[in-house]
Amino acid sequence: EGQLVESGGGLVQPGRSLRLSCAASGLSFDDFAIHWVRQAPGKGLEWVSVITWNSASIVYADSVKGRFTISRDNAKNSVYLQMNSLRPEDTAFYYCTTLAAADTINYWGQGTLVTVSS
Amino acid sequence: DIQMTQSPSSLSASVGDRVTITCQASQDISNDLNWYQQKPGKAPKLLIYDASNLKTGVPSRFSGSGSGTDFSFTITSLQPEDNATYYCQQSDNLPYTFGQGTKLEIK
């Protein structure tokens, strides 16, 4: 059974940086594009970024473009989200997911909370 | 970016009722529309993919339909465990946008 596990969340001051990690197990990791989706407390889901299996294509939401960088290391079955110049409005649970529109390969992590506050 | 307009934002219904949620895309997305269920403190869970395909293991009281720009999601014979928030999401074009969500309360 495939599993994704996020880590790296926490409390950070505005303007500072944080790096999230997403570790995969039990799935053919390099078959999948990996997305980050976030959810501010009590709010809806917001798509953040995607990286294809070979890192050839990377896309960001306008709200994070120029501040966040997604990367992956297939040898470590991991995806990373480097978040710079953090703002209070970046406060959210961050989920990594395959976001696959398919029967058995739509995996989500449990989420990691990022709180941006002074 | 494709905008997804989901309605209603909330609804309340009783056990055994039938409820329908709609989702409208700002442009033609063929059948690239998925429905998720999210319970408090949990990650979203895929229920329906490609507009009408039920994910394995999801109860048959859940169904989806539509294509192009107009989609609907129906739960027949509501159960207490259906108390959750439901989201539509388009997977036709990046960024893969979500609807605003529908919070379903079981009376």
Image (cartoon, helix red, strand yellow):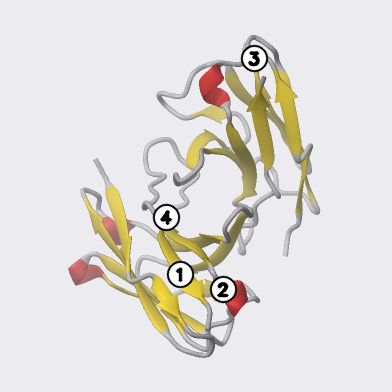
Q: CA distance from mark 3 to mark 2?
A: 37 Å
2 and 1 marks in contact (CB < 8 Å) = yes
On the same chain: label 2 and label 1? yes
Marks 4 and 3 share the same chain: no
Q: Chain of mark 4?
A: A
Query: CB of mark 3 within 8 Å of CB of mark 1?
Result: no
Q: Chain of mark 1?
A: A
Three-letter amino acid code at the position of disc 3: Thr
Q: CA distance from mark 3 to mark 1?
A: 37 Å
Mark 4 residue crowding within 10 angstroms, few (<14) / some (14–19) / many (20+): many
Estimate the spatial distance between the alpha carbons at disc 1 and disc 4, rounded to whole Å. 17 Å
Q: Chain of mark 3?
A: B
Q: Residue at x 61, y 53 (%)?
A: A42
- Which of discs 1 and 4 lies nearer the camera? The answer is 1
Q: Is residue B14 above or below residue A91?
A: above
Can the viewer see residue A89?
yes
> Can you identify the residue that label 2 sits on?
A90
**Local secondary structure at mark 2:** helix
Residue under label 4, please give it. Answer: A97
Q: Measuring from the top left, give residue A114's x and y in whole percent.
A: 45, 69
Q: Position of residue B10 (x, y in %)?
A: 74, 36
The quadrant where residue B68 appears: top right
Q: Nearer the viewer, mark 3 or mark 2?
A: 2
The numbered mark at residue B76 is 3
Measure the C-alpha gap from mark 2 to mark 1. Answer: 8 Å
Let me know if marks 1 and 4 both belong to one chain.
yes
Estimate how packed mark 2 is, as few (under 14), some (14 to 19) or many (20 or more) residues with alpha carbons within 10 Å: many
Closest to the observer, B46 or B10: B10
Kind of residue at disc 1: Val
Q: Secondary structure at mark 3?
A: loop
Decide: marks 3, 2 in contact (CB < 8 A)? Answer: no
